[in-house]
Amino acid sequence: MNNDQKFINPGKDPVVTVDGVKYKRLCIKTHVITNEDNIINVVTKYVKELAEEGDTLVISEKAVACTQGRAIPIADVKPRKLAVFLSKYVTKTPVGIGLGMPETMEMALRECGTLRILFAAAVSVIGKLFGKSGWFYMVAGDKARSIDGPCHYTLPPYNKYVVLGPKNPGLTAKEIEEKLGIGVAIIDANDLGCDILGASKSALPSDTICKIFKDNPLGQTNEQTPMGIIRIEK
């Protein structure tokens, strides 16, 4: 068996072609990352021996956020009436609860500000009148887009947590590159799409990374692979 097989999640292709270039995708399994961890220590432990010149390390924004204490027990979030009201009108998707529960909406109000969320909600209503979607997050921004709550497939203990987006993802990516010597991108990815929240100077272009990760090879359920290496296939 090819040694790379251990870095491939079920149902995902090990190599994809983007704009005529073949890229290998190595998904890296880790322990369950918590606020007891330091993200630089984590990536050093799991990635340093694997990294090669020209690689780009891709890290789930949830993994970074959890090391920053940005995972909050649902029981500690007391949603206001406005959060309960707004959450009822959030479109639910199969890939995550997003702001579709009072606790996650409450954290959006705290993170982004009440006025911004109300304006985003108003813009969203206008967008729906014209058959357009996604206008809410265009206005609310990455802080709102990155907030997520538990779903039936969420890995414990985070099936009882609200997880916010990471702080300073660009700076974090830069610090990890300085440690490992390869490009780094911190991403928010699911089966519907991919957003680059922060990237270091040696990382592949954001649009290229999103194309490579179009099928979400790191997975959303029990894969426990919050990071992966992108490598040009030689």
Image: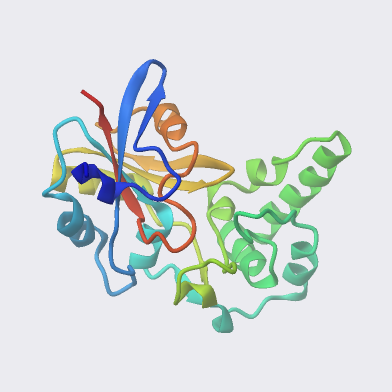
Spot occupied by residue 119 in the image (x, y as percentages of width and height):
74, 49
Q: Is residue 130 above or below residue 136?
A: above
Residue at the left extreme? 49
Left or right of 143 in this view: 65: left
Between 163 and 106, the residue placed more toward the observer is 163
Label count reads 0
Residue 37 as seen in the image, left or right of residue 180: right
Q: Quick one: which residue is furthest to the bottom in this view?
A: 75
Identify the image quadrant of the C terminus.
top left
Residue at point 55%, 59% (across, down): 147
**Front-most of residues 217 and 190:** 217
Residue 87, quarter of picture: bottom right
Lateral position of residue 9 relative to residue 152, left or right: left
**For residue 172, above or below residue 113:** above
Q: Residue at x 77, y 74 (%)?
A: 81
Q: Which residue sits at x=49%, y=74%?
A: 72
Q: Whole-percent x and y of residue 199? A: 34, 39
Examine the image and state in which quarter residue 2 appears: top left
Q: How is the image coloured?
A: rainbow
Can residue 159 be seen here? The reply is yes
Residue at 24%, 31% (x, y): give it. 202
Note whether 185 is above or below 6 in the view shown.
Answer: above
Q: Position of residue 143 (x, y in %)?
A: 53, 53
Q: Nearer the viewer, residue 197 or 204?
A: 204
- Asked whether the viewer can see residue 201, the reply is no
Q: Residue furthest right?
A: 129
Q: From the viewer's perspective, is residue 56 above or below residue 155?
A: above
In-image side of 69 versus 174 (left or right): right
